[in-house]
Amino acid sequence: MQALSLRHLRKTYKNGITALNGIDLDVDEGDFFALLGPNGAGKSTTISIIASLVTKTAGTVSVFGYDLDRQRDLAKSCIGLVPQEINFSQFEKVFDIVVNQAGYYGIPRRLAMQRAEQYLRQLSLWDKRDTASRQLSGGMKRRLMIARALVHQPRLLILDEPTAGVDIEIRRSMWDFLRQINRAGTTIILTTHYLEEAESLCRNIAIIDQGQIIENSAMTTLLAKLHTDSFILDLAAPRAETPAVAGYQLELSDPHTLAADVPKQLGLNNLFAGLDAQGITVVSMRNKHNRLEQLFLDLVEGQKGIAP
Amino acid sequence: MNTRIAFQTIVRKEIGRFMRIWPQTILPAAITTALYFLIFGQLMGERIGDMAGQRYIDFIVPGIVLMSVINNAYSNVVASFYSTKFQRHIEELLVAPVPPWVILAGYVFGGVARGLVVGCVVMAIALLFSEVSIQDYGVTLAVFLLTSTLFALAGFINAVFANSFDDISIIPNFVLTPLVYLGGVFYTVDMLPDFWRILSLGNPILYMVNAFRFGFLGISDIPLWQAFAISGGFTVLLALFALYLLQRGVGIKS
């Protein structure tokens, strides 16, 4: 079953700007789906239409088979939203924010309080339950928005840049939590500017640019389109000149560091053999770019007519 | 979807909000009206003498209580709903399956509740200065409910259209206050020259103040049925307009 189905979704704002140009998108139940795109591409407009925060100009939105126009309550009950901007009352206490959100979904207060405790504990916010939300750190606010979005136990969780401005430790713990709820059956749609995050978490991906979907495939299929990987090699001994190995593009960044573009058909073994033959020892290596980042840039720049 | 729970949640939040900040929401009305009773009622009132056959302080009590109800019902909803828009936590309601009429009813109920709390506080202060009592509880309660609902709705509509904090103070300062002061709170319209008396009949607050005064003192400048017809008519019109705005997402959705 499809958790989300968009058909010919179009949005033109009152100022005449067309944010979405008739997009079609399907997300399967249970998926962990990445919706990526540069700033202003239409990601947040898409999410806001699905979450009923923005009125669409045309098209249909269906959530687990429920049409958002005709079966509004059923469709909305399936969705949990973690928005990009902090949007809770600055004066309300953490516990009240989560319990009240449950109330808006018609959940009895006793059950709402149990669930609020469950999610606040899972997201390490239980100690802050009586704190006014304005006194929370940025990372805590993000986690509070996740707890609030989950309190009615939605089947589809949409996260719009949930880890923006969050330190790496909290980001990793949020990833673990999201993986956990995805394994438990919640479909997740994620937008992020951290492409490492999307590559690490998501199984399927759509890239949106200028209001259109320009790529929609499995993450593995997309990554397989990358013909060249770029690596940074740390050398044991300093070198004055860039070595040459046939088929590879090499460049000495400094006497101890060699940048290498490795065509997939040649692989790494041939490169190491070529360097070894010249008496060069590589002590360690790492990816120059995140792979998805490279593909993302290629696709978006290609869309703009810029040679990658 | 259990709309009763959603409604209760909004009401609990609204009442919790104005009770939490009672020095801003309840105390000012208590102090202002105590000054009114002291200056207009006690000090000047004794020199003014009777009005419409009543002691002046007794005459002004119903109007001052209703004035507090009107101001507080209006300002509760306009401030709360605008703040909800401004801080964007209106989105908490929009993403959830809460019907627009439940959102409207919840906020209006919050305004009525503040009107009731402040009205009771002001009445308690009035009893320190006056011996006025309620003659007709049914009329008094009906006028209170209609008037507070009407002005809570007006506050909601103001908040929907407001784009800044200035916008939520323009109507209360430049429209509501003059209408209340010229609405027969401190005098009977029979005292006015014909031109001003007829002009005053175009002020809807005059009808509500007089109907409320009838509940307390059994006197009114205008027939009771006119007061209920006008308040009821305006309430229905504003409720329908507010619902239309919410359903269209005016001021809250792009």
Image (cartoon, coloured by chain):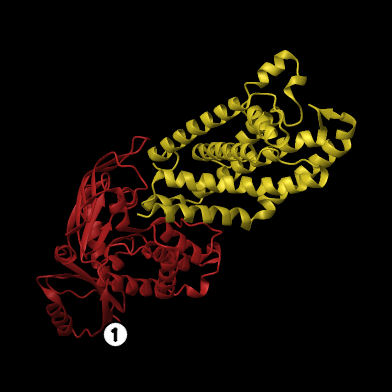
Chain colours: A red, B yellow
- In the image, farthest residue toward the right: B47
- Give amino acid for label 1: Ala
**Image quarter (top left, top right, bottom left or bottom right) of the N terminus of chain B:** bottom left
- In the image, farthest residue toward the top: B194
Q: Residue at x 83, y 37 (%)?
A: B41
Asked whether residue A145 is in view, the answer is yes
Left or right of A127 on screen, residue A19: left
Residue placed under numbered mark 1 in the picture: A237
Q: Position of residue A200 (x, y in %)?
A: 26, 70
Q: Position of residue B236 (x, y in %)?
A: 48, 33
For the residue pair B153 and A47, the one nearer the viewer reads as B153
- In the image, farthest residue toward the left: A265
The residue tagged with tag 1: helix, strand or loop? loop
For the residue pair B242 and B148, the one nearer the viewer reads as B148
Q: Residue at x 52, y 33 (%)?
A: B235
Left or right of A65 on screen, residue A134: right
For the residue pair B80 and B19, the one nearer the viewer reads as B19
Q: Position of residue A127 (x, y in %)?
A: 51, 75
Q: Position of residue B12 (x, y in %)?
A: 53, 56
For the residue pair A22 and A272, the one nearer the viewer reads as A22
Is residue B18 shown above or below B225?
Answer: below
Is residue B22 shown above or below A248?
Answer: above
